[in-house]
Amino acid sequence: MSLTALLLAAVAQAAAQPASGCTPEHAAMGHCTLPTAPVQQQSKPPAAAPTPDPHAGHTMPQQPVAADPHAGHDMGAAGQAGPEPGPPPSEALSGPAHAADEIFGPAMAESRAELHREHGGMLSYMIMVERAEAVVRKGRDGFAIDSQAWFGGDIDKLWLKAEAEAAWGEKLEHAELQALWSHAIDPWFDLQAGLRHDPQHGPDRTHAVLGLQGLMPHWWEVDAALFLSTEGELTARVEAEYDLRLTQELILQPRIEVDLSAQRIVELGIGSGLTEASAGFRLRYQQTPAFAPYVGVEYERAFGGTARFRRAEGESRDSVALLAGVRFFF
């Protein structure tokens, strides 16, 4: 290296040293102190210019204040429990039964009578032949009729019932007529009382009647009665039947009848206890409710002393009958 290059390198090294002449090696040896680096000041963003008010200088009207709907109310009871539930006070029922009469006079009585008449108080009637049938049984073909009619209102009615049974070409084997006053004791049953007379061939009887007629649960129609004859004989009869609808027009009707007697009545050929019972069914074709032909079968049997009376007369104690008849009403 030439002398000139050495001189230039020395000048460059001297220019790279700090102006104070303190190097880091001399500062570490405690010979001098390095100058501190100047702290750079962060520049702040310029403040945004304020937005001018569009309503500056305008006179704005004041908004009306809504009135309080509860102003003046005592709201202290809100949220508190109400009065205890219970029956109305006694004074609530102490007024007249028909208070409107005090204002409108007798015209209200006429209105009440009209209202009662139009809502159940009207009178009506029905005449029904429940069974008018030919009976075919071994050695004793014949006919049987069972009919009833009533007239009255929903609560009280007059009932008339009639039954007759005989062999073809012979006198009536059994006949009875009943006239009963019927009173509804609940929505399903009527209590009936009246008289029954048996205008049949041979010894006749007149009975006082006390009965119950109506609908049992599951729609069984029941007719039960006690009969006290003028001779002091007490008998009873229970009938039950049910309409089982197979289709809209075909109805199968099972039917049971049981007769009982409190004593032995030799004159009428009746023993004591269970005297007779019958069970059968009728298949009814009901194209209209008012008229329905039917066919059926029925088994009948006598018991106890009644069966012995029949055997003494040369009759069987039981029999099976084929039935064909019609049921109608108007």
Image (cartoon, rainbow, N blue to C red):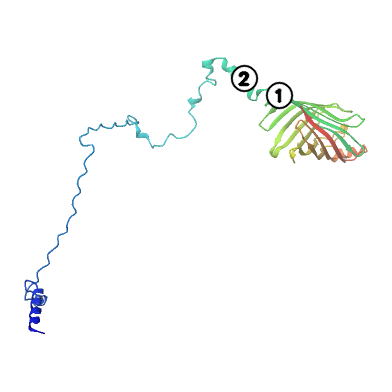
In the depicted view, which residue is nearer to us: 199 or 228? 199
Residue 124: numbered disc: 1
Residue 255, position in %: x, y?
A: 78, 38
Q: Earlier in the sequence, mark 1 or mark 2?
A: 2
Q: Are marks 1 and 2 in contact (CB under 8 Å)?
A: no
Q: Total marks drawn?
A: 2
Location of residue 169 (image quadrant)? top right
Q: Is residue 146 above or below residue 308?
A: above
Provide residue 320's location: percent of width, then percent of height.
86, 41
Q: CA distance from mark 1 to mark 2?
A: 16 Å
Q: Amino acid at mark 2?
A: Glu
* Number of other residues with Cα within 10 Å of mark 1, as a class: few under 14, some 14 to 19, many 20 or more: few
Q: Return the residue nearer the eye: 47 or 205.
A: 47
Quadrant (top left, top right, bottom left, bottom right) of the C terminus = top right
Label 1, secondary structure: give it.
strand
Corner quadrant of residue 115: top right
Residue 90 in picture, x, y percent from top left: 49, 27
Kindly identify the residue that appears in the image at 49 percent across and 25 percent down.
92
Q: Is residue 172 left or right of residue 112?
A: right
Q: Report the disc number at residue 268.
A: none
SS class, disc 2 = helix
Q: Is residue 129 visible?
A: no
The picture places residue 173, in percent across and down from the top left corner, at 88, 31
Q: Label 2 crowding class (10 Å Cα cut-off): few <14, some 14-19, many 20+?
A: few
- Which image quadrant for residue 67? top left
Question: In this view, which residue lies farthest toward the bottom?
Answer: 1
Is 31 displayed left or right of 164 in the figure?
left
Vertical placement of residue 326 versus 2, above or below: above
Image quadrant in which the N terminus is located: bottom left
**Tag on residue 114?**
2
Q: Amino acid at mark 1?
A: Ser
